[in-house]
Amino acid sequence: MENKKTRLIYEFLKFGITGGLGTITNILIFFLLVDLGGMPEIPVSIGCFIIAGTQNYFLNHFWSFREYTGNTRISVNRWAMFLIGSLAGLGVNILVMKLIIVNFILPWKFIAQACGIAAGMVINFIISKLIIFRKKNAY
């Protein structure tokens, strides 16, 4: 039992590191386009989600869930499922981001975006672990 628990924690940490890298990508693009470029936050947030989600799919496939994916090739179907599965996290992200923007005075809106990303992380891990990168589906 301890082995499964340890493996789950290790996978979550790798998923978190991958997500952290995706967060950096997401926030950097968001900051450039919204805070510096004046573009509207929701469409930019969705675009950032697709870019960072694609980056995260590759890292999760080749590193976070390598035990399940092995040496299999990248799958467009798995990538699409990963992005679709991450929509729940995106919904939480946008909700939290907008709540913070509306209710707090912030020097930079990317702070609200970062809080939204953190709020959606656990949901994304559960979906990735149980649906996208489970051994049976990793091809």
Image: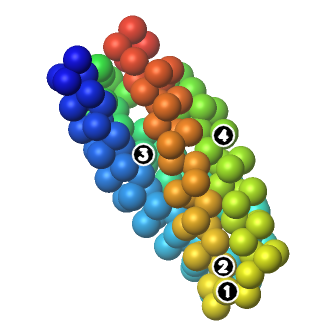
From mark 4 to mark 1, how far is it between C-alphas? Answer: 26 Å
Q: Nearer the viewer, residue 7 or 84?
A: 7
Q: Earlier in the sequence, mark 4 or mark 1?
A: 4
| Residue that carries the numbered disc 4 in the rendered image | 87
Three-letter amino acid code of the residue under disc 2: Lys
* Residue on which disc 1 sits: 106
User: Tag 4, which secondary structure?
Assistant: helix
In 3D space, how far apart are the residues under numbered discs 2 and 1 (Cα atoms)? 6 Å
Image quadrant where one finds the N terminus: top left
Label 1's element?
Answer: loop
First-in-chain label (1 vs 3): 3
Q: CA distance from mark 4 to mark 3?
A: 14 Å
What residue is shown at x 46% (from left), y 61% (from top)?
Answer: 23
Q: Which quadrant would the C terminus be assigned to in this image? A: top left
Name the image quarter holding residue 114. Answer: bottom right
What kind of element bears circle 2? loop
Tag 1 and tag 3, C-beta contact below 8 Å: no
| Residue contact at pointers 2 and 1, CB within 8 angstroms | yes
Above or below, 73 relative to 119: above
Task: Report which residue position mark 2 lands on.
Answer: 109
Q: Which amino acid lies under the numbered mark 4 shown in the image of this protein?
A: Leu
* Quarter of the rendering containing residue 39: bottom right
Q: Is residue 57 left or right of residue 13?
A: right
Image location (x, y in percent) of residue 12: 34, 40
- Left or right of 40 in this view: 54: left
